[in-house]
Image (cartoon, rainbow, N blue to C red):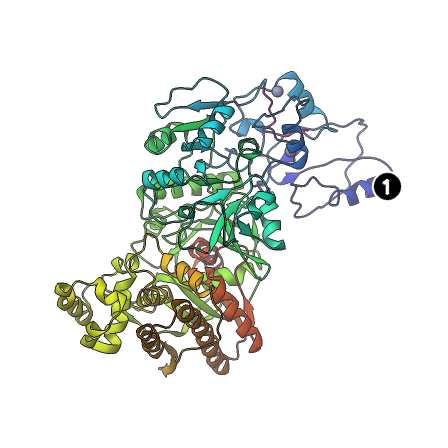
Amino acid sequence: MNNPSGVLLEAQGGEEQVAEFLSGIEPLAPPLAVISAVSSEQIPLVEEGGFIVRESGGGGGEVQISPDCDVCPDCLGELFDPADRRYRYPFINCTNCGPRYTIIKGVPYDRAATTMAGFTMCEECLAEYGDPGNRRFHAQPNACPVCGPRLTLLDPKGKSLEGDPLDTAISMLQRGRILALKGVGGYHLAVDACNDDAVRELRRRKNRDEKPFALISPGLAEIMEYARFDETEQRLLSGAERPIVLLRKRERNPIVSLVAPANGYFGVMLPCTPLHHLLLRDNFLALVMTSGNLSDEPVSFLDDEALQRLAGIADLFLTHNRDIHTRTDDSVIRVFQGKPIFLRRSRGYVPRGITLPSVQRSVLAVGGELKGTVCLTRGNLAFLSQHIGDLRNAATLRSMEETIVQLGRILRIDPKVVAHDLHPDYLSTVHALSLPGLTKVAVQHHHAHLASCMAENGLEGETIGVIFDGTGYGPDGTVWGGEFLVGGYGSYRRAGHLRPIPLPGGDAAVRAPFRMALSWLYMIYGELLFALPLPPVSELPASERKLFMRMLERRLNSPLTSSCGRLFDAVASIIGLRQKVSYEGQAAIELEALAESTVNADVYPFGITLDGGVQILDFCEMVQAIVQDVVTARPEGEIARSFHNTMAEAVVETCRKIRTESGIDRVVLSGGVFQNKLLTEGVFTLLVKSGFYPFTQRLVPPNDGGVALGQAIIAGRSVLCV
Ligand code: ZN
Ligand code: ZN
Ligand code: FE
C-alpha cells in the first residue's frame, strides 16, 4: 500500500522466507524506485493468503515524488513493434518510465491525483494495472490507444488539421516549418536543425538574436556527426533524466551555424518522451528544440495559453489532451572532470531530495532574482524546485507562487520559516516578506552561494568560499560579485574581494560590456583613454564622453562593484569580442570559447594588497598588459587564454594568503562564473597542487539557481528562529 510515508508491505511465512523477502527489497527494486530506508517490525499473525494491493491511505508525509523519466527500453521496444497494441502510441509508459512530477496534483500518488484522472482504463489496461506480475502493475499513467490521451495537430487558429497528426507534423518539419510541440513539462518549438531558412525564421519570430538553441537527436550515432562526447557525457545523455548536455562542436558539422553562433558548444539531448522518439527516428539528424516562449517569459504549458502566445511563432501545433499540471523546463548540464555542472536543474531531477548534512527544521527559501528556484526542506532533505526563471517578470513571479504551493502540497511541507535575499527590491524578497505568520530570515547572496556548495558536499565548520558571479547585494551598499568569504552556515566574514570599480549606468552596464571596459580604462588612464585605439572607445560617441566621465567621477547611477562577471565583460570588450550582449553572461561564454581555441601558460601581472584585514585583488596591471597586447595585435585567443590563467593564479594566491591567516584549507567554489569550465579546471587544479581541498557544485547549479539551497540551510540553522 502507498501511503504518504512510503510503501507499507505485509508478508507472512517461515522465518527464512520472510528474511529472504526482506533482503530482496533493495536489490530487486524497480529501476525508478528510490529507497531511502527499509524498516521492519513483527505484527500479530492474521490468517490471510494470496497477494493483495490495498488502496492508498493517509499517513505522516515522508514520501518522495518521482521526477519525470524517459521511456524505458521495454516500452521503447513495444513502441516500435508493429505487433504490439501500443505500436506508435505516444503515451506508452509503465512503472519504470513515464511522466510523474509534471502530472501530479496531490498525494498520495494515485491516478485520481494526476492529470490522467479523466481517462478511464479499458479492460486490457485495467488487467495490466491489476496484475502484480505485469510491468504496468499500478502504473498510474497507464494508457493505450483505446482508452488514453490522443494527439491532435492544430493550425495557429486552433483548427485541427486532417490526416495523421504525427505523419503530417514530420512532413511539415521536413519542409522547414516551425512546430510547437507539447512535451512533458511544457511546449517546445522545433525546426529542422539542418535547414538554414527554418532556423533563421525561428530566430526572427522568437525575437532571440544570439542565445543558443538546444538540439535533440534520435540517438548517440546521430549526435556523433556534429558533436564530441566522452563517457560521462554519454552517460548523462542516455540517463533516464534526459538533460540537455553541452557538447563540444565538431569542426565541420551539418548543423546550421545560426543554432549556436560564436559558441564552442551545442546543447544536446536525446528524446525524453515516446513522442520525441516517434518524431525523430529515421526522420531527422537533429531538430532544434527550444522552449516554447518569447524571450525571457516562462515556458507555455497550458494548451490555450500556448496557442495564444505562440501563434505568431509556430506554423502548427502538435498537442494532446493529457494536461501538464506543473511547468518544468529542460535541465542543462556540462561536464567538468567527469562530474556534472548543472547550469539548470529542472525536468528529470525535480523533486528528488538533496541530502543535507543534518536534520533541520522545515523552511522555505525563495532564492534570488535571475534563474529563480525555491527550496523546501523536511528532515535532512532539501527539495529544490524546477527552474522558474527571471523574476523581474510578473508572469514568472506568479509561477514562483504556484511552485511554492504545489511543492508544499505534494511533499506535505508546511514551513514556519522563510529565507530570502538581502536585496530589498527582488520580487522574491518582496513575496517572502508578504507571507503571513512565517519567521523571516534575510541571507546575503554570496553567503547563500557558499552555504549551497558546503551543503551539497556535506561540509560542516568553516571554509573559504570563492564566490564569483554577476551581481549580488552587499551589506555595505556596494554591489558584490568577486568575493572571498570565510565562514559556515552560521556566519561569514568578507576576507577578500576584487577591487571595486564603478558600474556605469548600473544594470545598463550588464547589457553593454563596453561600459564596464570604459570604467576600467578610465580608472587606469583617466581622460587619456580616449586616445587608445581600442574597440570599447570607438563604441562611445565623442559627444557622450564628457557626460560619461562625469557619471564615473560623481558616481551618478554608478555603484561600486567587485563583480567578477563584469571583469569578464570588460576583458571581452577590450579585446574586441563583444561590446553589447543579448543575455547575461554571453560575453564570458564567448571569451571562454575563444580561450579554449589556443593553449599557453602565460600569466599577466596582478596585485594583492591587505586593507584593514581584507585582501584586495587588483587587476589594473593585468588590464594594462591586455591593452598593450591588443595594441600590438597579439591574437585574441592568446589574450583570452592568458586572462583565464591569470584569474586562476590570482584566486589561488589569494586563498593562500587567507589560509595563512585563518588556517582553513577547504575551499568551496560557487557563483555563476564557475559555470566556466576552463576557469573552474584551472582553479581546481592549482588549489589541489597548493595543498587545498577544493569543492565544486555537482548537485545544484553554481549560478543563482542554487542559491535557494544555501538560503534554506542557513535559515534552518539560524538561531533567530529556534
Ligand atoms: Zn516503460
Ligand atoms: Zn487501454
Ligand atoms: Fe549569484
> Counting other residues with Cα less than 10 Å from the Cα at mark 1, is it few (<14), some (14-19), or many (20 or more)?
few
Is residue 722 positioned above or below 36 on the image?
below
Would you say residue 62 is visible in this rendering?
no
The residue depicted at 70 percent of the width and 31 percent of the height is: 135
Total marks drawn?
1
Task: Point out the quarter of the image occupied by ligand 2.
Answer: top right
Task: Decide: is 389 above or below 684.
Answer: above
Q: Which residue is mark 1?
A: 15
The N terminus appears in which quarter of the rendering? Answer: top right
Residue type at the position of mark 1: Glu
**Residue 218 place in picture, x, y as percent:** 57, 39
Tell me: residue 603, above or below residue 482: below
Q: Relative to the observer, which residue lies in front, 131 or 376?
A: 131
Q: Residue at x 34, y 79 (%)?
A: 621
Residue 289 makes an appearance in the image: yes
Q: Nearer the viewer, residue 353 or 536?
A: 536
What element does badge 1 sit on?
A: helix
| Quarter where residue 139 is shown | top right
**Residue 646 in picture, x, y percent from top left:** 43, 74
Left or right, 474 with reference to 103: left
Q: Is residue 362 above or below residue 642?
A: above
Q: In this view of the protein, which residue sits in the foreground, 296 or 192?
A: 192
Magenta-highlighted stretch: main secondary structure? loop
> Is residue 100 a member of the stretch shown in magenta?
no
- Please say whether residue 138 is one of the residues in the magenta stretch: yes
Mark 1 C-beta to ligand 1 under 8 Å: no
Q: Quadrant of residue 66?
A: top right
Residue 48, how many percent across, how many down? 80, 27
Q: Which residues are magenta?
A: 136-145
